[in-house]
Amino acid sequence: MREGYFISELRRVFLSRGCFFHKIPDSIATSGSRFSTLKKFDAFIIYKGMFAGIECKLVKGASIAIDRFRNSQIDSFADLRAAGAPGYFLINHRYKAKNNVIVWTLDDFIIARTIAKGVGRKSINLTIGGWPTLVKSHGWNVDPLFQMMNHYYGGINAS
């Protein structure tokens, strides 16, 4: 599976749940161009008036390299949070025949990165932790992400 296919799957699920979903187009890759800007993150969604930035990662194995997270992505999520909205890393973690998506906030990533670097690792072990997870069963169950968004916005859409 490619990351683009993963994003397309998520798009279908978000749209079926009444979200606005917009995938940000990739930057134009031209040789020698100094002026193409990096996109901030992969997509954004609006669900019941709540906005969130989404950055997707596809991982085959038990860990993800820290350098897979660009400084511009981390800075963009920090800017997004400063403006009053959350950003989430959705890590499609395919390991031992399981296909789950770990959901990290910016703080979750910073903590995991700090711990990994503190013990001299260049990658983050995805098999430990108690991170919220989206499980695939006839499409991705995105309810945990919606619950995180609702919590971030102070429970404005509590049902």
Image (tube, grey):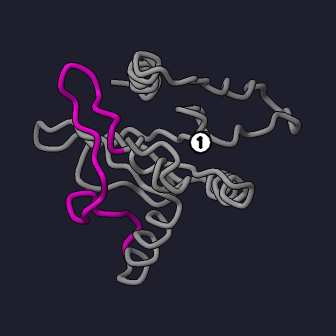
> Image quarter for residue 16?
top left
- Measured as percent of width and height from the top left, residue 87 is found at 57, 49
Q: Is residue 80 magenta?
A: no
Is 32 on the left-hand or right-hand side of 85?
Answer: right
Image label count: 1
Q: Is residue 122 magenta?
A: yes
* Amino acid type, label 1: Gly
> Image quarter for residue 28?
top right
Q: Residue at x 58, y 40 (%)?
A: 50
Nearest the eye: 28 or 100: 100
- Measured as percent of width and height from the top left, residue 84 is found at 69, 55
Q: Residue at x 72, y 28 (%)?
A: 27
Q: Residue at x 63, y 54 (%)?
A: 77
| Secondary structure predominantly adopted by residues drawn in magenta | loop
Is 77 on the left-hand or right-hand side of 92?
Answer: right
Q: Is residue 26 above or below residue 113?
A: above
- Measured as percent of width and height from the top left, residue 120 is found at 38, 80
Answer few, some or many: residues within 10 Å of disc 1's Cα (few below 14, many 20 plus, some between 14 and 19). many
- Identify the residue position indicated by label 1 in the image: 53
> Image quarter for residue 118?
bottom left
Residue at the extreme front: 159
Q: Is residue 138 above or below residue 132?
A: above
- Measured as percent of width and height from the top left, residue 82 is found at 72, 61
Q: Residue at x 21, y 36 (%)?
A: 99
Q: Is residue 81 above or below residue 157?
A: below
| Magenta stretch bounds | 121-144
Is 75 on the left-hand or right-hand side of 60?
Answer: right
Residue at the extreme left: 96
